Image: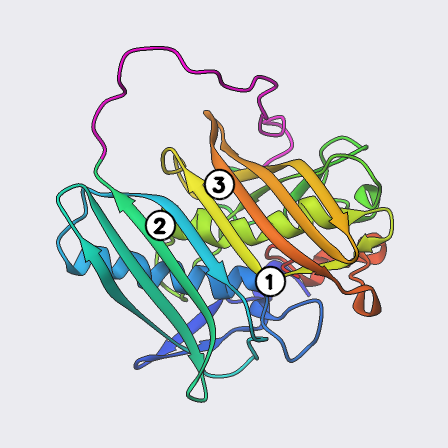
Amino acid sequence: MNENTFQLGWFRRVGEVFEPLPLAQSLWRSDQMHGVAVSGLLARALEGAVVAAGRQGLVPARYHVDLFRPARMTATTATASVVREGPRLMLVDAVVEQDGEVVARGSATFLRPTVNPEGEVWAAGDLPTAPPAELIRPDGEHHVPFFASAEPWSDNFGEHQNAGRHQTWQTAMPIVLDEECTPFQAVASIADATSMVTNWGSGGVQFINTDIGVVLSRLPDGVVLGLRTVDHLAVDGVAAGTAQVFDRRGPIGMATVSSIANARRTVDFSSFDKENHQGPPGA
């Protein structure tokens, strides 16, 4: 199956309902939707509420998603509401529902940008960088995600099933078929891959994330961006993962996931077939 077989988007819109497309299918279960699609749909709803309020000058600074029920490959709705609006900020909540039941919720804080104050503040060095230009496709051209680990950048997933420090570089898929993906939707959806880069080790991905958190200093410069593991801590089957979010210009924020052990359904990428999965391999 080649790339043209897939429809480039996570959902097809039918009235007010969103029907998941094949690429939205999780690798944990065939009837389950992955967090990349769910998070993207929540971000779309949150961003839409800001636009509807005429506050396009605000930028997203904090984003959080709770994935507390498995989202199925079935008709889905997403709605958002403004919780608080002031001159310098806007707080928006959103929910994703299936069959009248909330399966995920999200919230975001949008802030009004100004200028940095004078003075110096400590910041970390060792900045992440994008893969070499000769490896990646032009902007806007969708591709299998690239990874780096104990092995250098490549789209050969089997090479990266190791205990090295993982990174990924991805082009965001449109959330809805025939709609353009925005930079916020891109970072919100790709942020679910924080679970992949932080939880992926020599035995595969053996933890499943229950949430996604992102803090941003600015939006990415497009819909192509990366994640690099900062740390992974696991005790008694509960894991905390942190990753840097970056684009070609450098770091833009941090992403976190809380995860629980799911060894019975380990996602093993050592034999992953990239030819039949052209989008990000959302677990």
Residue 224 has which mark?
3
Residue 210 has which mark?
1
| Residue at (70% x, 63% y) in the render | 276
Name the side, left or right, on which 176 lies relative to 155.
left
Callout 1 amino acid = Thr
Q: Are marks 1 and 3 in contact (CB under 8 Å)?
A: no
Is residue 8 among the parts visible in the rendering?
A: no
* Residue, disc 2: 182
Q: Are marks 2 and 1 in contact (CB under 8 Å)?
A: no
| Residue at (61% x, 19% y) in the render | 126
Binning the other alpha carbons within 10 Å of mark 1 as few (below 14), some (14 to 19) or many (20 upward) gives some
Residue interval drawn in magenta:
113-136
> Element under label 3?
strand
Residue 14 has which mark?
none
| Residue at (24% x, 61% y) in the render | 83
Instruction: Quadrant for the N terminus, please.
Output: bottom right
